[in-house]
Image (cartoon, helix red, strand yellow):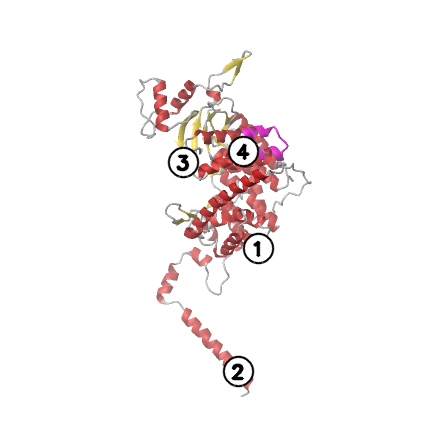
Amino acid sequence: MRPLRRGIIVSTLSFLFFFALFFYLTEPTPAQRRRQHRLRPIDKILHPGWFKPRFKWKNVQQLHPVETFTNLPTGDHVTIPRIQHDFFPESANRARERERRLRAIEEAFEHSWNGYKENAWLHDEVNPLTGQSKNPFGGWGATLVDSLDTLWIMGKKKEFANAVSSLKKIDFTRTRLTEVNVFETTIRYLGGLLSAYDVSGHQYPILLAKAIDLGEMLYLAFDTPNRMPVTRWKWQNTVLGHSQEAKPSSLLAEVGSLTLEFTRLSQLTGNPKWYDAIARVTDLLEASQNHTKLPGLWPTMINTYTGDFTRDTSFTLGGMADSMYEYLPKQHLLLGGQTSQYQRMFTSALQTAREHVLFRPLAPDETQRILLPGTVRHSAHKNTLHPEAEHLACFAGGMVALAAQIFHTPSNLDLARELVDGCLWAYDSMPTGIMPELFTALPCSEVPTTTKNGKPMQNCTWSTEAWHEGILSRAHPNPVAAPTAAVIPVTQNHTLRAEHLISQNALPPGFTSIRDSRYILRPEAIESVFVLYRITGDEGLREKAWEIGRRWC
């Protein structure tokens, strides 16, 4: 037998032998067969095993596919005014001071980042006291992904590259969550990946690849008969081919705050499907804007199942609604102003908010022009302001300032300043110098009016008596329902009762109650200070931001 033929035969027999051996060794044992039999249907789809196509989100069959997509707008070129102030060259002393502060901020970040790396790498969060990790956002490394753009901006390119290299270990098909919050996943993960891809100059393709993979996943939450998203999404049911519908009660922010990330993904990929998804939501929001209980604003809870937004009666710029409004001017910027839709929606919303939601609180310094956003509740054909301010709503000053620039409404910069100063007042009023999560104040509109030239005028002259009356009107008479409230005999006079409540609840002048005194790392106030500083160039705002940062640390 010729050597060549002998070699072929030997090679063939060797291959068959090792293949049989491999098959034998990989053949499941009876115990393995029982475990496989107990595998959930979802596991068999997500992890099909050897020699089978790998699961991909884009291959999941949709029950309500889109036939014609809404494309990104391509209207006439629009000139958007310069946003940032034209700063003068800084002096040598100011440059040294800025560098010193900059280093202090970097050290604070490094402390937090190193704590995360050492204790919770590739997990969502680290508990600061115990050092234990936790995964409230799917377990896909929320802190890692959300910090990428910060690493790049701070010039920590080596740390950035190391974090990016770890992204290959993140698998968006693996999570212990049975219900995914589409909003939280979008803003933290999709936003984090896309912003990192953009700020790094598109140098790291894995960032866009991961964003596309996640985008394919999130897009399936829109697979409903009316293409409105399921914001609290039982993703496993969708993968298994079960039908789903939008909910009769969805939070406004969770429905309306997907525009920036989905639009940017379409811009980067050239695939219009993500923009189409949010364009349908935006169209519904615009169509309903003037038909709510408070025309111009949308209620906190909306019915995305029927598209009827007239049922809920609560309106706010605060939690559960906030980012819906914040995204409007930013989306206008992202689209280059090539559609006026977002400008129209914002202009209408701001007008209504200005008339009904924003209020001037009674404060000891009567020269301060300050505003706070409250909550309006509609009942019996009447709108009532509930003057509870939220730390979350402090984004409003920055939002209004940005919109004033891009929409050619410079007069609204004064409104933005009053909103920013309102939050700064709340910061400065507290013993810690940090604004609480929730508090109420006394609107000047509830103070007895004064007259000028025979006409009634809003009275914002400081009055201890009016403040006391405001505190008593907010106090809960039931100690069971309000265990922190003081139990004061009604026979005592108002001043003693009010002073007891002030002492019991540590109320600063002007505050009528503090429902939640926590500070939970809210960035909204200092972000608005930053935005207004970069627009106006007011150095006092930068000093105030530094003061706030020192209080945090």
Q: Which residue is at the front of the view, 494 or 481?
A: 494
Separation of disc 4 and disc 1 at Cα?
38 Å
- Give the Cα distance between marks 2 and 1: 45 Å
Q: Position of residue 2 (x, y in %)?
A: 55, 87
Mark 3 residue element: loop
Q: Residue at x 36, y 22 (%)?
A: 499
At label 4, counting other C-alpha atoms closer than 10 Å, the crowd grade (few under 14, some 14-19, many 20 or more) is many
Asked whether the residues under the numbered discs 2 and 1 touch, taking CB atoms below 8 Å apart as contact, a structural biologist would say no
Could you say which is closer to the camera, residue 462 or residue 285? 462
Q: Which residue is mark 2?
A: 7
User: Which residue in the protein does label 1 denote?
Assistant: 205
Q: Along the polypeptide, which appears first: circle 3 or circle 4?
A: 3
Q: Amino acid at mark 4?
A: Leu
Q: Which element carries disc 1, helix, strand or loop? A: helix
Query: What residue does disc 4 label?
Result: 541
Gap in angstroms between the C-alphas marked 2 and 4: 82 Å
Q: Secondary structure at mark 2?
A: helix
* Callout 1 crowding tier (Cα within 10 Å): few <14, some 14–19, many ≥20: few
- For the C terminus, the quadrant is top left
Instruction: Indicate the amino acid at tag 1.
Output: Pro
Q: Which is in the foreground here, disc 1 or disc 3?
A: 3
Magenta span covers which residues?
Answer: 396-417
Q: Secondary structure at mark 4?
A: helix
For marks 1 and 3, the one nearer the N-term is: 1
User: As shown in the figure, which amino acid type bears the numbered disc 3?
Assistant: Arg
